[in-house]
């Protein structure tokens, strides 16, 4: 899904160093999630399960808002 690619690309670009240091282990879980489910979570982060994914989803959404 192109919209997810755009969101994730912004996060990867902004958080590349942190990802390389392993600071976002939840990212692997997100990448293995079906696109339609992940897109729903991006729209409604509080629906994400497990709840431990919510902080990274909020971070990804913030990257979307960045110029």
Image: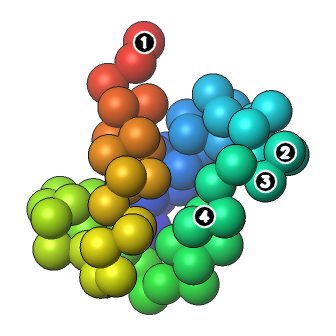
Kindly identify the residue that appears in the image at 85 percent across and 46 percent down: 20
Whichever of labels 1 and 2 marks the residue nearer the N terminus, that label is 2
Q: Position of residue 49 (x, y in %)?
A: 29, 82
Q: Nearer the viewer, residue 12 or 5?
A: 12
**Which of the 4 quarters of the picture holds residue 26?**
bottom right
Give yes or no for contact between labels 3 and 2 (Cβ–Cβ under 8 Å): yes
Residue 3 is at least partly visible in this image? no
Picture layout, residue 46 above or below residue 5: below
The local secondary structure at tag 1 comes to loop
Check the image and report above or below for 60 versus 39: above
Residue identifier under label 4: 27
From this viewpoint, is residue 46 visible? Answer: yes
Q: Nearer the viewer, residue 52 or 43?
A: 52
Marks 3 and 1, how far apart at CA: 25 Å
Left or right for 20, reference 56? right
In the rendered structure, find residue 22 and report the number of the disc placed on it: 3
């Amino acid at each position: 899904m192109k919209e997810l690619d755009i969101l994730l690309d912004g996060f990867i670009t902004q958080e590349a160093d942190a990802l390389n240091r392993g600071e976002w282990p939840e990212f692997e879980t997100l990448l293995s999630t079906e696109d339609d489910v992940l897109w729903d979570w991006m729209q409604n982060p509080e629906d994400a399960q497990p709840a431990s994914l919510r902080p990274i989803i909020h971070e990804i959404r913030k990257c979307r808002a960045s110029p």
